[in-house]
Image: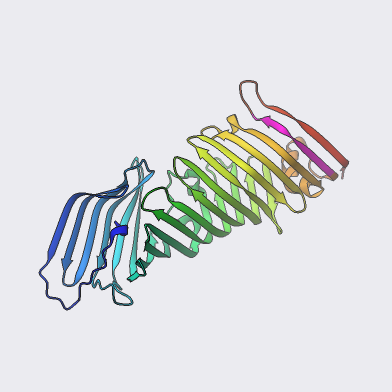
Amino acid sequence: MLFLLPAFTVPAHAMLPPVTVLAETIELGQYVASGAALELRDGGITVEIENLRSAEPADFTLQHLRLYCGSLDYHAPATCAGGSWAVELAESSAQEVIPLAGSIASLASTSGGWSLRSSVSSGAFSGGATVQGGDGQCSAVLTWDGQAVSSLPVPGFFSPEFHWVRSGTTTGTLTALIPREGDAHLKLSATTSGLGFDSPDGRFAGEGLDLQFAADVQPGSSLHSEFAASAFAGDLLIGNFYTAFSSPGLHVQGSLLLDGTQARIENLQVRDEHSLKLAANVVFNASDPLGSLAYQVDQFELNFPEAYSRYFESMAAGWALDGLTVTGRLLWSGAGQLAGQAGATTAGTLDLADITVADT
């Protein structure tokens, strides 16, 4: 619908009779709007759409979309100031609905298109948005600053673990490029401070985590994403594994390809300047990651004593092997799988350089 907003003017002083236009179905490229209504009254305009969905299979649909402009004048510098909008974002199986709303700062025509600036709110979350249309595509930029992580409008069905979050703030930007035809292109850049979470069974927990995350996502029948993440501070517990992050931090980056449930991570790079380096390619089934994981490792390097104290001592405590002094370096390259019909297998080359272990 946004692609086709007309560049017309309704002067506030015009004494036009109220006009209402109803449409059962409107097709806009690959999008289908149902239950549409447009009303002109007292120089303002109201647009309502009961349901807006893509003709192609999609994870989400828009429901109960409403746009109100008290004075729609594309020739004014800040037309539609004081207007409002609201929409409900629904997962295709209707398991959960996220309400979004905002107040419009301006809606104006630009060279070859239009632009919209507005606030965005959903529950306790608040941010700002800029939307632009023209030249066959629409772009939207959502920004937020110092928001509680738990307030982010992330659907629980998308990530049930999100409900584990109990503390932390976040600042970030989400950009979406939406062509009239074809798939959207998403870019995300975000930081979190003081993130804390607990799983119901106590096996996973975090406290005071300072993180950075960036992703460039191209969804479609097969998803492709470049990603990078860093942890600079805080404590992390995963089962028997525990570590405390500190500067210069742990850095992870790679390229994710997802086709159905088949996933591949290419050029996976993990590094901690003082203790750990990893370069690998990984393949797994998203429905059973650990039971289907296969890997090719080009480089796995551990530098002691930092690697022991940061990543291994907590697990070694289960065998009363904590409190050791470990020095030297371990290098490994090879391939293997965690499970399968033949069970876990590993083959490769191991190099131990000046390894010493002392019980202190």
Say which residue appears at 56% left-offset and 59% top-offset. 192
Q: Nearer the viewer, residue 2 or 248?
A: 2
Q: Is 248 situated left or right of 26 in this image?
A: right
Q: Is residue 100 visible?
A: yes
- Tell me if residue 336 comes above or below residue 66 in the rendering: above
- Residue at the farthest left position: 17
Query: Percent from the top left, x then y, of residue 256?
Result: 56, 43
Where is residue 155? Give x, y as percent: 42, 48
Quarter of the figure with the N terminus = bottom left
Identify the residue shown where x is 63% and y is 40%.
239
How many numbered dots are placed on residues in this image? 0
Give the quarter of the image for residue 346: top right
Residue name at image x 17 percent, y 52 percent: 23
Most common SS among magenta residues = strand
Could you say which is closer to the camera, residue 189 or residue 326? 189
Where is residue 49, by image quadrant? bottom left
Q: Which residue range is magenta in the image? A: 329-338
Q: Position of residue 29 (x, y in %)?
A: 31, 49
Q: Is residue 28 left or right of residue 154?
A: left
Q: Is residue 331 magenta?
A: yes
